[in-house]
């Protein structure tokens, strides 16, 4: 919309014409914007003074400033435009939900036409950038506000996040297209890959036994941060890629001693494929009791999910493993096609076994072989089992050197090796975790030394 045709009355009319995307305007900042448009419109007829207009502008500015300055996301364009676009990507309505479930081709023409018209209405609202709003406020109050164009977020890792990159891509496409209605296909494609609502906004969640809780800043670990286990990572990545593409894939069990990078491998693979629509849902031991409820919730979504159970093991008196067995295979409902279970454990067989359960041992169990077979069968439900063992000395040193290069640590190789071996002895064992802690210590040491030398 050109500056000459822009008016508060037209903005209010565009908001009232929204049908599918009316929920976008439920956001407090959107409500503040609409109130400001109402007052600016009334001021033209002399029905309101300058003070209410200034107060409405101040509220809108505070809300936009809080969203940008206290966040980590760099706005795609003007902060007001970016807010509208964020709300569009998250909105759950018949168009976005149908696009997520079946794609644009499966929709009726009327639904597509209405979505296109709604996008054009939203473009009219987005045309009110910082310059346009401050100019209109100045015309009523006699004082031009500073505007919000230069709001700046906290430094974050958005550029490294594949989901954030995908959201930015579609927002840029809309901003660069004068007629947002022409982007209905781009938007539908985004919904199809990434879903809507919370699944479209976050790539990691925790299951609290009742609901999914988003993780706003999930572990940013990448496979390149985990040297020394390339073959293991490739197995897990290949299995997960098949799953994301809708091909047969296996539930996976990663087992081995603590510190070998099992949990980090799962998180890194999920990070790698977040841009393809994969989401990670972490489940605690306590959450296993309500696993069927979680499965039911995830089955209704369009995304694909890794249900991640970290540090999994059971004592012989615990029965939660039976619920997990039923969800992996064998229950009447079965595991949803869009869910895989990845678990890590220090134990290969997951459930503690006793000598008394071995065949021939003295026990009051009438069928000790059956009891032991039941416990062993849990691990067997994982079609992919990957063993993570501690590295030998050379592999450990290779990890240290790789992590040092990646972190930009500058040190003579002989000195690096000498100190890495000493650190390993102090820590009581070699592992990927030990290597990462050693490099973290070196980075902190060198940073502090640099600070002291600059004084």
Image: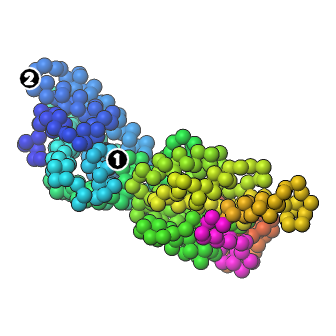
Residue that carries the numbered disc 1 in the rendered image: 90
Any part of residue 88 in sight: yes
Q: Give the class, few, some or many, for how many residues have Cα within 10 Å of label 1's Cα (few <14, many ≥20).
A: some
Task: Please state which of residues 162 and 238 is positioned toward the viewer in this rendering.
Answer: 238
Q: Are marks 2 and 1 in contact (CB under 8 Å)?
A: no
- Give the residues in magenta: 380-408
Of badges 2 and 1, the one in the foreground is: 1
Q: Is residue 20 left or right of residue 195?
A: left
Magenta highlight on residue 401? yes
Counting from the top left corner in percent of width and height, residue 346 is at 72, 62
- Rendering quarter of residue 401: bottom right
Residue sitting at x 28%, y 40%: 24
Counting from the top left corner in percent of width and height, residue 163 is at 41, 58
Any part of residue 404 in sight: no
Residue that carries the numbered disc 2 in the rendered image: 45
Task: Please state which of residues 54 and 239 is positioned toward the viewer in this rendering.
Answer: 239
Counting from the top left corner in percent of width and height, residue 365 is at 85, 55
Mark 2 to mark 1: distance in Å? Answer: 37 Å
């Amino acid at each position: 919309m050109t500056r000459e045709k822009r008016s508060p009355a037209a903005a209010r009319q565009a908001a009232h014409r929204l049908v599918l995307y009316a929920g976008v305007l439920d956001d407090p900042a959107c409500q503040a914007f609409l109130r400001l448009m109402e007052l600016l419109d009334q001021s033209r007829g002399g029905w309101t003074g300058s003070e209410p207009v200034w107060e409405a502008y101040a509220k809108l500015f505070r809300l936009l400033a809080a969203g940008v300055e206290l966040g980590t996301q760099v706005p795609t364009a003007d902060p007001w435009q970016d807010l509208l676009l964020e709300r569009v990507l998250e909105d759950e309505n018949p168009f976005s939900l149908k696009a997520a479930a079946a794609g644009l081709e499966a929709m009726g023409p009327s639904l597509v036409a209405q979505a296109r018209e709604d996008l054009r209405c939203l473009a009219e609202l987005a045309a009110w950038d910082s310059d346009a709003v401050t100019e209109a406020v100045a015309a009523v109050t006699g004082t031009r506000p500073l505007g919000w164009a230069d709001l700046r977020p906290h430094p974050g890792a958005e550029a490294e996040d594949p989901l954030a990159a995908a959201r930015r891509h579609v927002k840029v496409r809309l901003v660069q297209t004068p007629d947002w209605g022409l982007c209905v296909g781009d938007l539908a494609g985004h919904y199809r890959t990434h879903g809507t609502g919370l699944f479209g906004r976050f790539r990691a969640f925790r299951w609290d036994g009742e609901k999914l809780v988003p993780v706003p800043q999930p572990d940013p670990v990448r496979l390149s941060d985990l040297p020394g286990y390339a073959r293991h990572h490739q197995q897990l990545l290949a299995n997960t890629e098949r799953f994301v593409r809708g091909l047969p894939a296996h539930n996976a069990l990663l087992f081995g001693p603590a510190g070998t990078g099992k949990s980090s491998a799962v998180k890194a693979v999920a990070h790698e494929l977040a841009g393809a629509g994969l989401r990670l849902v972490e489940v605690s031991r306590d959450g296993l009791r309500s696993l069927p409820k979680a499965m039911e919730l995830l089955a209704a979504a369009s995304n694909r999910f890794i249900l991640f159970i970290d540090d999994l093991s059971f004592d012989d008196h615990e029965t939660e493993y039976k619920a997990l067995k039923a969800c992996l295979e064998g229950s009447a409902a079965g595991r949803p096609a869009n869910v895989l279970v990845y678990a890590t454990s220090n134990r290969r067989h997951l459930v503690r076994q006793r000598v008394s359960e071995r065949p021939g041992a003295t026990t009051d169990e009438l069928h000790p072989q059956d009891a032991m077979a039941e416990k062993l069968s849990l691990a067997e439900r994982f079609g992919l089992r990957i063993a993570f063992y501690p590295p030998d000395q050379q592999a450990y040193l290779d990890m240290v050197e790789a992590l040092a290069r990646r972190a930009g640590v500058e040190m003579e190789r002989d000195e690096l090796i000498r100190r890495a071996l000493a650190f390993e002895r102090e820590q009581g064992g070699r592992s990927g975790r030990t290597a990462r802690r050693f490099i973290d210590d070196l980075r902190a040491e060198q940073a502090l030394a640099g600070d002291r030398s600059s004084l």
